Amino acid sequence: MSNNKEKLFTEFTAPTTQEWLDKIEVDLKGADFQKRLVWRTNEGFNVQPFYRREDLANLKAVDSLPGEFPFVRGNKKDNNLWFVRQDIKVEDAKAANAKALDILNKGVDSLGFQIPGKDLSRELIATLLDGILPQYVELNFKTCQRHCVELAEILVAYFKEKDYPLAELKGSINFDPIEKILKKGKDVTPVLAEGKALVEALKELPGYKCINVNSVSLNNAGCYIYQELGYALAWGAEYLNILTEAGVDATEAAKRIKFNMGVSENYFMEIAKFRAARLLWAQIVKQYEPKCDCACQMHVCAITSEYNQTLFDSYVNLLRSQTETMSAAIANVDSIVVTPFDKPYEQPTEFAERIARNQQLLLKEEAHFDKLVDVSGGSYTIEHLTDAIAQEGWKLFLAVEEAGGFLAEALKGNITNAVNASNDKRHAAAATRREFILGTNQFPNFTETSEGKQPCSACCCGTATNETGDLPALNTQRLASEFETLRLSTEKAQKQPIAFMLTIGNLAMRQARAQFSCNFLAAAGYKVMDNLGFKTVEEGVDAALEAKADIVVICSSDDEYAEYAIPAFQYLAGRAMFIVAGAPACSEDLKAAGIENFIHVKSNQLETLKAYNAKLGI
């Protein structure tokens, strides 16, 4: 056999980037390349429609391997195993223990216990962990911040009493006073001094993290991805400073820090965020000259977002959380919590929790995501996004550091105000449908009713009431909340408004505009009635009145509105609200004739629907 290996396609010359651009320009037929194909992100940079090897030429992190500093490609070398975690609220220790034992037999290998500080005791922990072998399960605990040291001491004593292999145990205690500053607006800085004592209390449990960065709270408050990245880094650096200044060894301090980060629906960007986070955190820790590179590893628990979940069409939440889980798994995080789909309106049911567990198990057992080590590594697009978002996150990190650090900025209210401003922008974007919420402001379920569901106060309470009045608090109002309030108010009305599509004229245009109008108005809970078309406006109006319509929407082409709109409006004679679907050139003439209502792609959907409800007496 010949030793010469034939290279496929050697007869073809590889096209240059410029040749690709020239071809795209031809295919666009004069359309603006920048407007049509370049993605302008909220993160401060543009994403091109294609990338080539040359775009990665100056990226040093591309040359590293999985498990190697700076860990952009993950902490693991030969697999992508992650912990499937489910959190349990401990109201009764025996019941929580029974639930934990049950779900451990259903695929969970990481438990999160939320324990009220007033209930904490040795007896509670003994009851809670009865029958659970901690050397095989990751155990995570959250309690009142002032009880964290006590909890640590109880756990160590319990594990010793049971003669468990302390060096093999993995878990965490969620100590993060800064989160309370942000979420509650309460200055709890004196509690930060307990960080050193907590680390010392866990010295016999080297596998336990205890200093947490809960940037998931920023994610659930609607921050942009680069903000969560930059702030999480500054947050972690603040804790490193506090611990080392208190006398904790830098290596030990870094190894005790855990990041609980949110993950939203922006699939590729979230993959890049976690990769960039590991890259930048490794660089930050390296400046403290740790004794080993392993101290530079970032340990992340990813939690799917609550911010984009919806009350209506709530099964769509499964689609959101599934892509979010995929992003986190592909990005090689250490553990994942999938938020149950029904959390916006109820304490998650057993069914919802089972589905949430299975979403991860499917990725492991059927898609084999746990076998793939940095599957996104080498992807030109992902590598570019990783570098680009790292740059934006680093800029924000430096800005926070130059302003005095994360704690100082949090106490000034600057962190909270910046995140709340982003939340406001996103709500404004949703109101004008520049940010789509599937099933809410885009393609709502026309026939769905709430069936008594009401938003949980913890999920869409707006700006939290702070405990001192001195500091602002994060606004955790979900993106869909205002649309849901509108739709729920419509449901409570004595009569469900009927919106009738008066379709006439050009077939393609009337169908397109009727579909747009149905989606637009159904978002308020109106009953929409589409039609095949009418020969005259009088026929259409008569049919609308026979259907007892409260709203008549004329759907035609821009050119034909000059012919049809005014006669239809005059024939209707105020017997129902009249709307023109579109923004035709003859709009001023129509307004002069008394027509007030127009809906089109540039309309503020939320404000328009609020105004219509007001006109309808709702």
Image (tube, rainbow, N blue to C red):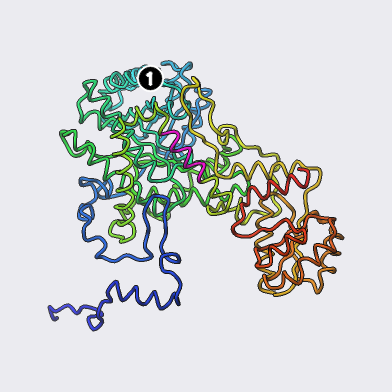
Tell me residue 78's x, y (percent). Answer: 26, 50
Of residues 151 and 128, the one drawn nearer to the viewer in this rendering: 151
- The amino acid on which the numbered mark 1 sits, given as a three-letter code, is Leu
Could you tell me what secondary structure mostly forms the magenta stretch? helix
Name the quarter where the N terminus is drawn: bottom left
Q: Is 330 one of the magenta-colored residues?
A: no
Of residues 457 and 411, the one drawn nearer to the viewer in this rendering: 411
The residue at the far left in this view is 3
With 323 as the anchor, is 211 left or right in this view?
Answer: left
Is residue 169 at all visible to an observer of this figure?
Answer: no
Of residues 593 and 151, the one drawn nearer to the viewer in this rendering: 593
Looking at the image, residue 495 lies above or below residue 140: below
Who's the residue at 26% across and 24% down the image?
243
The secondary element bearing badge 1 is classed as: helix
Is residue 366 at all visible to an observer of this figure?
Answer: yes
The residue at the far bottom in this view is 11
Name the quarter where the C terminus is drawn: top right
